[in-house]
Amino acid sequence: MIEVINDEYYMDLAISMASKAIGQTGINPVVGCVITMDGSIVGMGAHLQRGEAHAEVQAVKMAGERTIGATAYVTLEPCSHFGKTPPCANLLIERGISRVVVAALDPNPLVAGSGIKVLQQAGIEVKVGVLEARAKKLNEIFNHYITTKRPFVTLKSASTLDGRLATKTGSSQWISGATARAEVHTLRHQHQAIMIGVNTLLQDDPSLTTRLEVEAKQPIPIIVDAKLRTPASAKVIQHSGQRAIVLTTEAASRDHEQQLQQYGVTVVRCGAGEQVDLHAAMQWLGEHEISSILLEGGGKLNGAMLQAGFVNKLVLYYGMKIVGGADSPALFDMAGVELMQDAYTLEEVEVAQVGEDIRIIGYPRYS
Ligand code: AOF
Ligand code: ZN
């Protein structure tokens, strides 16, 4: 195939650079920038870490003198505000860029179109919307967090074809094959935190670490534990790459809280009810700059999070197995809806074969 060289061609390169940085920019977006002049690429850059240079700054640096009359391709609208770094829109103007091609607007209320305006007022030709759908998906986490101040939650599961997480005796290894299990570690790398229920912790004692062929980012373990039953000896407390957060209620034992704190655990009391108040929990996590969570179940927590409207995306692996059993743990253990028309439905569904398993990705519609 011969790829025709046009605006999409260079934007594709910028998106590609940004996409490899998913998971490493914290609450910031991933952004890529390519600068071209006289038919050549003269600068490239990506935003790699919060607090560090924005993509445009990196690309301009590489381009050096060759920015006057150049075109800049940016996956996200250049910023117009003073954050941890000065505004990129001003930088592009100062460096004499004459044309800016943008994939998607920045939903950050501090920017939201004003970056484009600043460029246009300076007489720069601006084109918006090149590969926009891809660019928006690339920053689905950032776009959600910056507008709601709550974490983006991806629910990941491995279940049988009949929607069970284990057999009636609790046997669960393995439902999905090696290829699917390897993908899960990439998902862990790409999320800031990983959430499980205390029942899963007590049953499986998982380590919740990211294990890849290369060095990977370790998510913060979050345990939803109303009665504070998490033992200090649990692997997530003793061996995880990051200090755990345990979400509990007012009634939880102060002594046990102190014991967990000795291991660096943060215990957060969310509500005074029987269950952890998920609204309070999500609020707290958002305020503490956790912008993404990989939810790895159990069925009760999956059900509660879905019912509360906090699940933004589903990545469901189905092993080609049927186990039956009325009491086998279900993927969504919740009261259930009365009528089919009240079912939770998924949008933008993607189905793929992954090794011997099927992977379904979708976005729940809440209305
Ligand atoms: C861009 N290019 O590469 C990025 C942008 O705290 P700061 O200074 O890093 O600013 C963060 C905000 O800037 C972030 O919320 C988003 O609106 C924008 N990010 N903008 O032009 C970049 N990373
Ligand atoms: Zn910027």
Image (cartoon, rainbow, N blue to C red):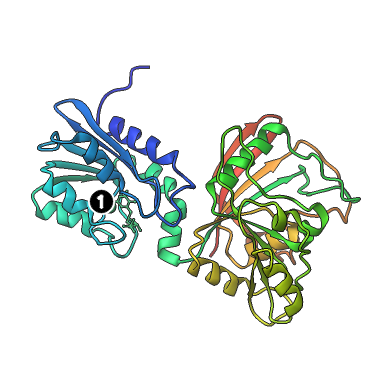
Residue lying farthest front? 262
Q: Estimate the x, y position of residue 73 in percent, counting from the top left.
A: 25, 39
Q: Tag 1: residue type?
A: Pro
Q: Is mark 1 within 8 Å of ligand 1?
A: yes
- x then y, percent, for residue 351: 59, 38
Report which residue position mark 1 lands on: 78
Toward the viewer: 18 or 165?
18
Residue lying farthest left?
Answer: 123
Q: Residue at x 82, y 55 (%)?
A: 203
Q: Position of residue 144 (x, y in %)?
A: 45, 59
- Above or below, comparing residue 143 to residue 102 in the picture: below
Residue 1 in the image: above or below residue 274:
above
Task: Note whether residue 26 is visible.
Answer: yes
Left or right of 177 on screen, residue 284: left
Percent x, y of residue 40: 20, 25
Q: Quadrant of the N terminus?
A: top left
Outermost residue, right direction? 169
Point 72% across, 55% down: residue: 238
- Inspect this view and state whether residue 253 appears: no
